[in-house]
Image: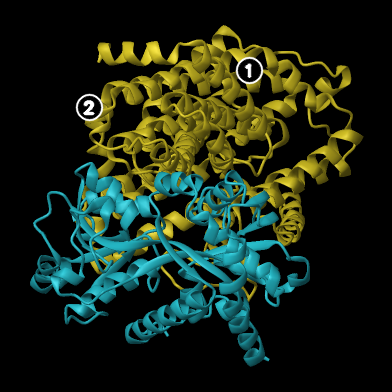
Amino acid sequence: MLEGLMIGLSTAINPFNLMMVVFGCIIGTFIGMLPGLGPMSIIAIMIPVAITLGDPTAALILLAGVYYGAIFGGSTSSILLNAPGVAGTVATSFDGYPMAQKGMAGKALTIAAVSSFAGGTIGAILLMVFAPMLSSVALLFHSAEYFALMVVGLSAIAAFAGTGQVGKALMMTLLGLIMATVGEGAQFNMPRFTMGLMDLQSGFSFITLAMAMFALPEAIFLVMNPARSAQGSDGASGGKITNLRFSREEGRKMIPVIGRQSVQGFFIGVLPGAGATIASFLGYAVERNIAPKGEQEEFGKGSIKGLAAPETANNAACTGSFVPLLTLGIPGSGTTAILLGALIALNVTPGPRLMTDEPQVFWAVIISMYIGNLVLLILNLPLIPYIAKILAIPRNYLIPFILFFTLMGAYIGQNNSTELLILVGFGVVATILRFADYPLAPLLIGFILGTMLEDNLSRSMQLAQGFGFIFDRPMALGLLILAAVLVLLPSYRARRAAKRAEGVADGD
Amino acid sequence: MKFTRRVMMTAAAAMVAFSGAAQADGHQVLEELHFLIPGGAGGGWDGTARGTGEALTGAGIVGTASYENMSGGGGGVAIAHLIENADSMGNTMMVNSTPIVIRSLTGVFPQSFRDLTLVAGTIGDYAALVVGADSEIQDMAGLVAAYEADAGAFAIGGGSVPGGMDHLVAAMAMQAADQDPTGFSYVAYDAGGAAMAALLSGEIQALSTGFSEAVALAQQGEVRIIGVTAADRVDTFADAPTMMEQGLDVEFVNWRGFFAAPGLDDATVESMRAAIAAMYDTPEWEEVRARNGWVNIHNPGADFEAFLEAQEQQIGDLMRTLGFL
C-alpha cells in the first residue's frame, strides 16, 4: 500500500496536476453555489474539458476538485440563503441557516468547511485502507435493507417534532411522501397523479420543491417583516461579520460528532443506492438523538453539532461512493455514474482489476481526494468573510437577489418554464404553512426519501411475495427496530422526565 | 392530413439519395446545428447529442453546434416543444431512442415518431442478459432451466420500468424459449447501476441490460453474458454468445437517432442527413464512437422509417401479449 501511495503522490504532486485541482475546486465552489447546478451537472459540463487533457490522472484530479468544490459550494447557499441546491445539503440548512440568522454566518461557513474537510479526508483514509475489503460490504444490502435504511432516515423528522408539533411534523412528512408519488415511478409504466400534465410526468423536481419550501418563504418573510433581516438584528446593523471562528470549547463538542459521522457517513456512502442524502439525514438524526437533553433542543435552532453532523456525513459518503465505483465498476449515485462514463472515455475500466492493472489511476484518485480536500480548505477559509458578506447587502438588494437565485435555480435544471409556476404555487402554500407554524423540513425529507422508500418496498414485496422479507432478513429487521427506537426514545425520555417532575410535585 | 405528411416525408427521403451524394465531399454542409436533448446533462441522450456534435464540428462538417437540455415527461416535453415551435426550429435536431417507440405505444405521450421529420438513426446498442460470474447459470438454456426449477425464487431485473425496454428484452427471450413471457418475475430498478448491484448481491438471478454496459463488467470478470440480441457475435466482445446461436429467435437493437421539426423544408432535412452520412468516415467520429463503445447503425430517411415501423410492430405485439397494451 505504501508503494501505491508513493506512486499516487508522485503523479498527483506535479505542478500541472496541482494546478488542475486548484482550478477544479474554484470552478466547483462557484458554480456549486448556484442552486440548480449540483455536482452532477457541473461534472457533466467539465467532462469534455477533462477528456481533452488526455491523461486520465490529470482528468480525474480535475474532476475530483470540481466534485468537492461543488459539494462545498452547495452548503454555502444552504447556510446563507436557506436555498439548498442539492438534496445532500438540505440537512445543512436545518442548523446552518438559523446560525447565519443569528449573525454567525462566518462561523457556520467555517464549521461547514472544517467538517467537510474532516469528513472527506477521513473518508479518503478509510477508502485507501479498506476499499478492497469493502466491495463485499457494498453488496450486503438488498432492497429490503435499503427500505429499512430509508425508514431510519425518515426518523430524522423526529428532530422537528418539537413540543406539541409531533402531529404537524407527521402530517408534513406524509404530505412529502404523497408528493413523491407524482409522476412515473420505477415500478409503474404509467404516470400517476399528473392530472394529464406532461410537465409532471417525471414528478416534481427536487430543486423546485426545495426552493419553494425553504428559500421562497424566507424571502417573503423578509419582505413582510422589515425588522427581520437575513442576518439578524445585531449583524445587520454594522454589516460586519463577527465570530468567524469557533471557540475551543465548540471545537471540542464537534470532534466526536465529526469522528462518528465520518465513519457512519462513509459506510452509508459505500452502499450503492444510499448515498450522501441519506447519510446527511441519518447523521443529523443520530447526533440529535444521542446528544444530551439540553443540546437536543438546540437542534434546528442553530446547533453546532446539527451543522457539523450532516456536513461531515455528506462528504464522507461522497468519498464512500467511490468504493463500489472503483472496486466493482458500479456507480452508486448519479454523480458517480457520470464519473464512470468519464473514466471509460479515458480508457480506464473500473472494477476489481483496476487496483492491480492500473494502480497509478487508483492511487491518483485517492491522493487527488486528499489534495482536493486540502486545497478546498485552504482556498475557502480566507474567502469565508467575503462570501458571508452577501448577507450584509442591504435588504432591498438582497431580497431580489434571493428571488432571482431561487427562480433561476428552479429553471436551470429543467429548462422548463412550468417549473417557475410550480415554484411560485408551492412557495405561496409553504408560506401559509409557515404562518400556521407547520415545519417544512419534514415535508422535504418525506419527498426526498419517498421515491426510494416506495421503490425498495415494492421490490422487496415483489421478491418475497409479501411482507415476509422483514423477518427473512435480520438486518432489515434490525434497522427497522433501530428506526422505531430513534423515533420513540425522545418522547419516552420526555415522558419519563415529566413523570419524575410530577412525582416530585406530589411529594412522592 | 397525416397521409399528406407521410407522402411528403417519403418524397423528401427519396431525394436524399441525390443531394446527399453531391454534398458529402468533406466540406461544410451546415453552418449551425442546434441539438435538443430531451433529458438532463450526463444521460445517454445527452452523450449521444454532444458526441455527434463534437464529431460534426471537429470534422468541419458543421460550423457550430449548440445544445439544449429539456427534460420532463420522459422526453415528451421536448417532443411537444419541437412540434409546437416547428416554425422556429429550422436548424434543430432532437436526439431520441427506442423509448420514443415504447412510450408512444403506451400513450405516455400523445405523439409518435410519425409526427416528426425523421432525419436518421445513427448508432445502436444491443441488449444482453447477464448473470453473476459465480452463477450456476451458464447459458440461455440454463437460465430457462433455473426458472422452470423454481419460478418463485427466480427473478430477472433491469433498469427500466415494467413494460420498458429491459423487461421487453427478457420477455422476448422467454417467449422464444417457449415459456410464458408473462410468467417470470421482472424486478425494476431505477438505474442500470442499481440493477447491476442487485445482480452481484444475489437479489436477482439475471439482469437484462445494454450490451456495452455489460461488456465493461464482463471484461472485469464480474459478470457472464449469456445472450446478446445481435444477429452475429459483436466484435468488441466476441466471447459473448448471441441468443440466435442458442436457438432463440431474438433480435433487438436499442437505436439512437435524430429527429427534426415536422414540416421542415426538404433542403434542410437533406443537408442534415448529408452531414450525418459524411460524419461516419471521419476520424473524429471514430474517436467519439470508440470512446463510448457505440455500434454504427446508420438508417437514413426512408430506412429509418421502415426500421421504426418494424420495431413498433415487434414491441407492440409483445406488449399486447404481456398485457401492457
Q: Secondary structure at mark 2?
A: helix
Residue A89 vertical position relative to residue B69 in the rendered view, above or below:
above
Residue mark closest to the camera, 2 vs 1: 2
Say left or right for B237 vs A219: left
The picture places residue B142, in percent across and down from the top left corner, at 10, 66
Residue under label 1, please give it: A380
The picture places residue A322, in percent across and down from the top left corner, at 38, 33
Q: Secondary structure at mark 1?
A: helix
Closer to us: B67 or A83: B67
- The answer to whether residue B38 is visible is no
Which chain can be seen in cyan? Answer: B
Say left or right for A36 vs B190: right
Picture quarter with the C terminus of chain A: top left
For the point 35% across and 35% down, the residue is A348
- For residue B220, what is the image quadrant? top left
Closer to us: A488 or A398: A398
The image's mark for residue B1 is: none
The picture places residue A55, in percent across and down from the top left corner, at 44, 26
For the point 58% across and 77% down, the residue is B13
Which chain can be seen in yellow? Answer: A
The chain ID associated with circle 2 is: A
Residue B141 vertical position relative to residue B211 in the rendered view, above or below:
below
Classify 10 Å Cα crowding around label 1: few (below 14), some (14-19), many (20 and above).
many
Residue under label 2, please give it: A356
How far apart are labels 2 and 1 at the CA level? 36 Å
